Amino acid sequence: NKGNYVVKVDGVDISPNPVISGKPATFTISASTSQAITGGKAVIEVYFFGFHIHQETHDLCEETSCPVTVGNFVLSHNEVLPGFTPPGSYKLKMTLSGAGIKQLICISFDFKINFGASESSVSDS
């Protein structure tokens, strides 16, 4: 982490990795905070080959249990990517802001998407 943020990120876990289009994916962020967090928002942006393709905003308390006390906590975000999502390299940027605290942290990480295996209905006859 660069910058003087209230929240420090210890690690990011992506499951499954690579992400499969059309299937649920979970992004789990292990972090710690030097101040209690009573609420706020998480803005999630997705980039594909450098192009901004998606943005959504969530209540921070939907992504982790609030209030967040000083120390370690886990933020978990679930997403189902549409089946038509093209495979390739993506970047996810997450900005957390708290009530009364402008920006808690801004992190970004790369992830890959593969096409999901389609079910075959061909029978052996």
Image (cartoon, helix red, strand yellow):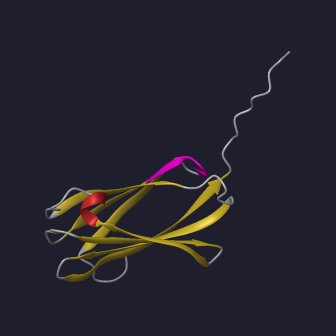
Please state the total of marks drawn on the protein image.
0
Check the image and report above or below for 24 versus 40.
above
Quadrant holding the N terminus: bottom left
What range of the chain is rendered magenta? 19-26
User: In this orientation, which residue lies closer to the viewer: 117 or 33?
Assistant: 117
User: In this orientation, which residue lies closer to the viewer: 88 or 71?
Assistant: 88
Residue 98, how many percent across, how many down? Answer: 22, 75
- Residue 5 seen in the current view: yes
* Horizontal arrangement in the rendering, residue 45 relative to residue 50 (left or right): left
Residue in the picture at 29% in, 66% down: 59
Residue in the picture at 68% in, 62% down: 88
Q: Quadrant of residue 112?
A: bottom right
Residue in the picture at 66% in, 74% down: 49
Check the image and report above or below for 52 versus 115.
below
User: In this orientation, which residue lies closer to the viewer: 79 or 29?
Assistant: 79
- Residue 15 seen in the current view: no
Q: Quadrant of residue 90?
A: bottom right
Overall secondary structure of the magenta stretch?
strand
Quadrant holding the C terminus: top right
Check the image and report above or below for 44 versus 100.
above
Residue in the picture at 19% in, 69% down: 39
Residue 118, how many percent across, how many down? Answer: 70, 40
* Horizontal arrangement in the rendering, residue 117 relative to residue 94 (left or right): right
User: In this orientation, which residue lies closer to the viewer: 93 or 85?
Assistant: 85
Residue 40 lies in the magenta stretch? no
* Horizontal arrangement in the rendering, residue 21 relative to residue 7 (left or right): right
- Name, please, the residue furthest toward the right: 125
Residue 37, how many percent across, how many down? Answer: 17, 69
Residue 22 lies in the magenta stretch? yes
Check the image and report above or below for 89 versus 13.
below
